[in-house]
């Protein structure tokens, strides 16, 4: 079986705590509402502290990258915003 994507595995291990992500031009504190692996494929959904949008995260078909889609509040479609470049756990007592 292929290895799990390192970025996805880190996000999964931090979940449900907040994490600081860099996704293209977007940086901020994200909280995942759900995160799961289907064999090696990663899927998650969450929000960012600074806006009302919903974000979806998934690994690419080749399992090399975690890509991110964004749906603005009140909109019906998703916009691709980039790929997760960095993941850091946010040590915030409010998470516990």
Image (tube, rainbow, N blue to C red):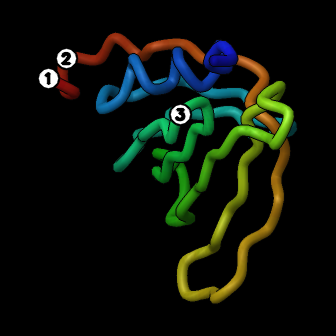
Residue occupied by mark 3: 39
- Compute the Cα span from label 2 to label 1: 6 Å
* Of the image marks 1 and 3, the number of the one nearer the N terminus: 3
CB contact under 8 Å: marks 2 and 1? yes
Residue positioned 46% across, 45% down in the render = 49
Instruction: Check disc 1 and report the residue beneath it.
Output: 96
Q: Position of residue 56 (x, y in %)?
A: 60, 54
Q: Is residue 44 above or below residue 53?
A: above
Counting from the top left corner in percent of width and height, residue 60 is at: 80, 41
SS for dot 1: loop
| Image quadrant occupied by the N terminus | top right
Q: Residues within 10 Å of mark 2 (few under 14, many from 20)?
A: few
Q: Residue at x 63, y 73 (%)?
A: 72
Question: Is 4 or 68 nearer to us in this picture?
Answer: 4
Q: Secondary structure at mark 2?
A: helix
| Residue 73 x %, y % | 54, 78
The residue that mark 2 highlights is 93
Question: Left of 35 or right of it: where is 51?
Answer: right
């Amino acid at each position: 079986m292929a290895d799990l994507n390192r970025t996805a595995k880190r996000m999964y291990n931090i979940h449900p705590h907040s994490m600081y992500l860099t996704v293209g031009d977007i940086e901020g504190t994200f909280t995942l509402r759900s995160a799961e692996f289907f064999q090696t494929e990663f899927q998650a959904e969450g929000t960012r502290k600074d806006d009302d949008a919903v974000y979806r995260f998934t690994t690419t078909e080749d399992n090399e990258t975690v890509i991110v889609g964004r749906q603005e509040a009140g909109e019906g479609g998703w916009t691709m915003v980039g790929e997760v470049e960095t993941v850091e756990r946010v040590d915030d007592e409010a998470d516990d």
